[in-house]
Image: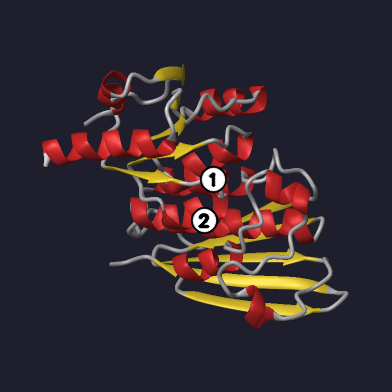
Amino acid sequence: MTVRDLITDLQLNPLVEGDLGRAVTGGYSGDLLSWVMGRAKAGDAWFSVMGNVNAVAVCVLADVACLVLCENAALDEAARARAELENVTVLRSNDTAYALAAALSKRLERIV
Amino acid sequence: MQMVCTVATRYEVNNLKLHYDVSGDDFTRAGEASGAIKATLKRLGFPADVIRRVAIAMYEGEINMVIHADGGVADVEIEPDLIVITLTDRGPGIPDVEKAMQEGFSTAPETVRNLGFGAGMGLPNIKRYTDTLTIDTEIGKGTCIRMTIAVPA
């Protein structure tokens, strides 16, 4: 499953489009940046409400496939600029992290 | 006639030394040094897992210096088989290193927590992603953290 598939399947709103062909191999949900950085895996879709510039840095360093802002959380302007610069995909949804992670899990199970 | 022979190393690098200043109290710039190292290692062809470990460990170190020490300096030595990162600051020092190594223990202020930091995972994450970690700290003088990450053959 690619980030592009994720956008379609989970009906996400793209805010910044990075590598949409990148494979999504799992998911991780959390808002404490160091916690996420320590535990999220490369290729995960990261569900969070953190839309600041440091969240984008975590995406780059932890090498996640994309950041999904849940419950319409805001992406601030500095974060948007950094995401565009770093080629990080940022998506947004009305849904909760729980609903989105459950939906991703179902789709990944189907693929496996 | 003199012939100069260059022996290519695994990653075409031999004792590359890089130095970065980490400015204090600027969370928007934190991660610039680790981002630059990530890009350099990628360009040199290091394995993705090694790059990720170096980037995460160094970012945590940078953030710690920004939160607690008003910045500092980062020195990185890149060898084909080993990455050595040394972070030096003139901050307040760590009163209880053992406690600071525990997951969840944090002395970060509320303002920092609101940015998503201060989960008490900085040093534990550094330990998790490095092969060796040495912390030299002195109250009122500063802290020097040295970490190494071995590159698998």
Question: Would you name the residue on which mark 2 appears?
Answer: A35
Front-most of residues A4 and A105: A105
Q: Which residue occupies 31% across, 67% down?
A: B152
Image coordinates of residue B2 in percent, x first then y, are 42, 58
Q: Which residue occupies 80% across, 48% down?
A: B25
Residue farthest along the right direction in this orientation: B140
Label 2, label 1: how far apart the Cα atoms are: 8 Å
Front-most of residues B6 and B57: B57
Q: Which mark is residue B146?
A: none
**The C terminus of chain B lies in quadrant:** bottom left
Front-most of residues B32 and A45: A45
A24 vs B132, left or right, is left
Front-most of residues B103 and A85: B103
Instruction: Return the chain for callout 1.
Output: A
Instruction: Please report contact status of discs 2 and 1: CB closer than 8 Å, yes or no.
Output: no
Q: What amino acid is at disc 1?
A: Asp
Q: Which residue occupies 39% across, 67% down?
A: B81
Location of residue B8 with respect to B39 vertically, above or below: below
Q: What amino acid is at disc 2?
A: Trp
**The N terminus of chain B lies in quadrant:** bottom left
Image coordinates of residue B33 in percent, x first then y, are 62, 48
Quarter of the view holding residue B9: bottom left
Image coordinates of residue A98 in percent, x first then y, are 39, 39
Location of residue B32 with respect to A13 vertically, above or below: below
What SS does tag 1 mark? loop
Q: Which residue occupies 54% across, 69% down?
A: B124
Question: Would you name the residue on which mark 1 appears?
Answer: A31
What SS does tag 2 mark? helix
Quarter of the view holding residue A94: top left
Give the total number of marks visible in the rendering.
Answer: 2
Q: Is residue B13 visible?
A: no
